[in-house]
Amino acid sequence: MKNDLIFEKITLTISIFLYALVVPYLEINNTHVFNPDWTPHVRIHEVWQLITNTSIGILSLWLIYKKRQVLLPFILSMIITGSFLISFMIKNTYDGSMKYLDGSEKTLFGLNIGIVGFGFAFVLLVLSLITYYRKNITTKNT
């Protein structure tokens, strides 16, 4: 990877930080993983998702900083952040919610914190991927 891909590396690192570290930090507690109102089956899916996303994040960082590859980390990070956004958009089809059982919800700027964080990350990833492709097209045509 060339040094001129700093925007791409920063964008990927921020996105990976969100889904591989921030989300587990926010969810390994009594609101999610240790929630007594959740069935054991639901909790195993939650832990599985956290381990999977963190593992993908670690793999992506290795690809970016050791192997100097960014395309696969872009794709993986967009799948993770985009899947959350899609699941939020279709939540009414499966009776899902980002609200806690007491009706409260973590918000930022009046919006759900997950939508703000992953929405921001997804937009950054898209813009960064476009920048990456434009640089490669320009480089190949010169």
Image: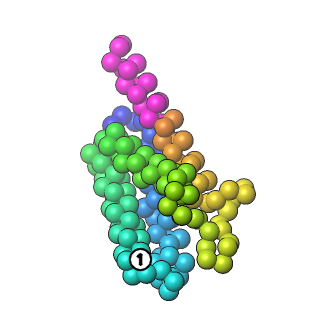
Q: How many marks?
A: 1
Residue at coordinates 38% horizontally, 20% vertically from top-left? 137
The answer to if 135 sits in the magenta stretch is yes
Residue 114 pos. (x, y %): 57, 59
The residue positioned 35% from the left and 53% from the top of the image is 61
Give the residue furthest to the right: 110
Which residue ends up furthest to the top in the rendered image?
142
Q: Is residue 70 above or below residue 34?
A: above
Residue 101 image position (x, y, % from top left): 61, 77
* Quadrant position of the C terminus in the picture: top left
Farthest residue to the left: give it.
Answer: 67
Residue 81 visible, this orientation: no
Is 44 placed above or below 83 here? Answer: below
Residue 104 pos. (x, y %): 68, 72
Please state, as top left, top right, bottom left or bottom right, where the N terminus lies in the image. Answer: top left
Membership of 69 in magenta stretch: no
Picture colour scheme? rainbow
The stretch of residues the image draws in magenta is 128-142
Q: Nearer the viewer, residue 68 or 58?
A: 58
Residue on which disc 1 sits = 43
| Image point (43%, 61%), residue name | 20
- Which residue is at 51% across, 35% downward? 127
The spot of residue 110 in percent (x, y) is 73, 57
Q: Residue furthest bottom?
A: 36
Q: Amino acid at mark 1?
A: Arg
Q: Measured along the vertical axis of the image, is residue 141 above or below residue 72?
A: above
In the image, 2 versus 92, the foreground residue is: 92
Asked if 126 appears above or below 20 in the picture, the reply is above
Could you say which is closer to the camera, residue 93 or residue 129?
93
Q: Left or right of 90: which side holds 109?
A: right
Q: Is residue 51 visible?
A: yes
Helix, strand or loop at disc 1?
helix
